[in-house]
Image: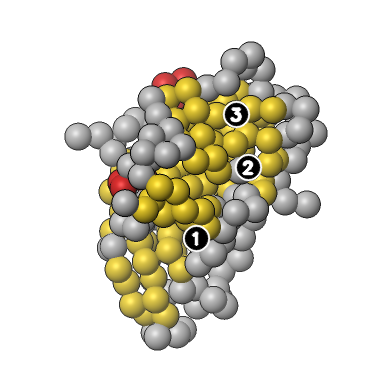
Amino acid sequence: AQKITQTQPGMFVQEKEAVTLDCTYDTSDPSYGLFWYKQPSSGEMIFLIYQGSYDQQNATEGRYSLNFQKARKSANLVISASQLGDSAMYFCAMREGRGTGANNLFFGTGTRLTVIP
Amino acid sequence: DGGITQSPKYLFRKEGQNVTLSCEQNLNHDAMYWYRQDPGQGLRLIYYSQIVNDFQKGDIAEGYSVSREKKESFPLTVTSAQKNPTAFYLCASSTLGGTSGRGTGELFFGEGSRLTVL
């Protein structure tokens, strides 16, 4: 079974509108971390936001927020007030365990977001 | 500035040739990783290392080899045994445990190397 599932290959959003990118995960480990990365066309991976499995509140970082629904095993990324520079691939990723060693991440297949002027 | 440097950015190889991709970091991170990215797919882990002179296979290690002789360096060799080596390769590093960056254990990535086999 896939550990991370992103069901939206592509999404479009009007500039200044909000958009939600979906991510569901599968793990039996009670300790895990969820990450979102942005990959512009240049190729580098930019870390956006993190949610730990024991965090009580949804994570927020500027215009990014994570809608964490533990019972449903979903960790959707919400981008508010979209900008043209937000056009990129977005990847959801998970680390299983408490992360005492290396932080191996499992990645989803990504969602390509296009912001329309 | 601290970061991860990958070279070369673009590389062409003939079938049957080995090629080595360089990855250097000056973040003083203990752990380093190599991921492969194919079009329409996410990143898949090739190898990772937690300490000098030690490394572990990831999900798709066949046809690849690595070394970790220095903390700062984690080169990846794509051997002729790798049946479909054309891909985008990303190197990353982190501290051990969930302390990288803002205490999340996030991975820091290089800009990638794009390998094309002719």
**Residue visible at 46% across and 84% down in the picture:** B16
User: Residue B103, percent across and down?
Assistant: 46, 20
User: Residue B78, percent across and down?
Assistant: 46, 68
Q: Which residue is disc 3 drawn over?
A: A67
**Which is in the foreground here, disc 2 or disc 1?**
2
Label drawn at residue A23: 2
Determine whether, in the image, residue A57 is placed left or right of residue B70: right
Secondary structure beneath label 2: loop
Secondary structure beneath label 3: strand
Report the chain holding disc 2.
A
Q: Which residue is disc 1 drawn over?
A: B37
The answer to which quarter of the image holds residue B1 is: top left
**Label 2 Cα crowd, 10 Å radius (few <14 / some 14-19 / many 20+):** many
Choose between A65 and B35: the one closer to the eye: A65
Cα–Cα span, label 3 and label 2: 10 Å
Asked if badge 2 and badge 1 are on a common chain, one would say no
Total tally of numbered discs in the picture: 3
Asked if badge 3 and badge 1 are on a common chain, one would say no
Q: Is residue A5 depicted above or below A99 in this figure?
A: below
The answer to which quarter of the image holds residue A74 is: top right
**Residue visible at 62% across and 50% down in the picture:** A6
**Residue visible at 54% across and 36% down in the picture:** A77
First in sequence, mark 3 or 2: give its number: 2
Q: Residue furthest left?
A: B1
Secondary structure beneath label 1: strand
**C-beta proximity under 8 Å, tags 2 and 1:** no
Report the chain holding disc 3.
A
User: Disc 2 marks which amino acid?
Assistant: Cys
Determine whether, in the image, residue A53 is placed left or right of residue B93: right
User: Disc 3 marks which amino acid?
Assistant: Asn
The answer to which quarter of the image holds residue A21 is: top right
User: Residue A44, percent across and down?
Assistant: 35, 50
